[in-house]
Image (cartoon, helix red, strand yellow):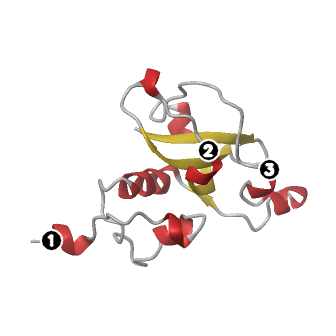
Amino acid sequence: MLLGQILRYETDGLPKVSCALFDLVFREEDDVPVPTEDKVFSILFTTQDTLDNGFWRLIGQRPVIVPQMRFPYETLRGAGFVGAKTYGSGIVKQLANAFVGLRPWDRYADPEFLDKLLVSADKKPKKLIYKKDIQG
């Protein structure tokens, strides 16, 4: 499993969460690694349907380690997040799967779409699957 952390539940408008995804993988719930800020590879707004339906499981509570100034669109909070992008949970699932090599990184019309969801270019994994790798 890939580790993520809810940074904040946002209640303005549609139900969404600010979340961080970490370059930390674990197999058992009792073996969850301790997240550190240097392991964050993506911070974004997403819909919370996968939390509500149990696809993404909440397995514990830890202090939020991402500084609030790095929360997505924090500068737009006072304006009700007008202009912010919320990514559907399906996009976030695809990002997580591609990050760990389960799906092609370049599967979207814009082959650099997932690159744009990373906090910085150096967070892009070195070993990825690309469409050309799986096409016969």
Q: Is residue 135 left or right of residue 121?
A: left
Label pair 1/2, CB-CB below 8 angstroms: no
Identify the image quadrant of the N terminus. Answer: top left
Image coordinates for residue 22, horizontal then vertical, percent = 53, 48
Label pair 2/3, CB-CB below 8 angstroms: no
Residue designated by label 2: 36
Residue designated by label 1: 135
Residue designated by label 3: 68
* Distance in Å between CA atoms under marks 2 and 3: 15 Å
Front of the two marks 3 and 1: 3
Q: Residue at x 75, y 68 (%)?
A: 83
* Distance in Å between CA atoms under marks 3 and 1: 42 Å
Secondary structure under badge 3? helix
Q: Residue at x 71, y 48 (%)?
A: 66
Q: Return the disc, 2 or 3, that comes first in the chain's sequence.
A: 2
Secondary structure under badge 2? loop
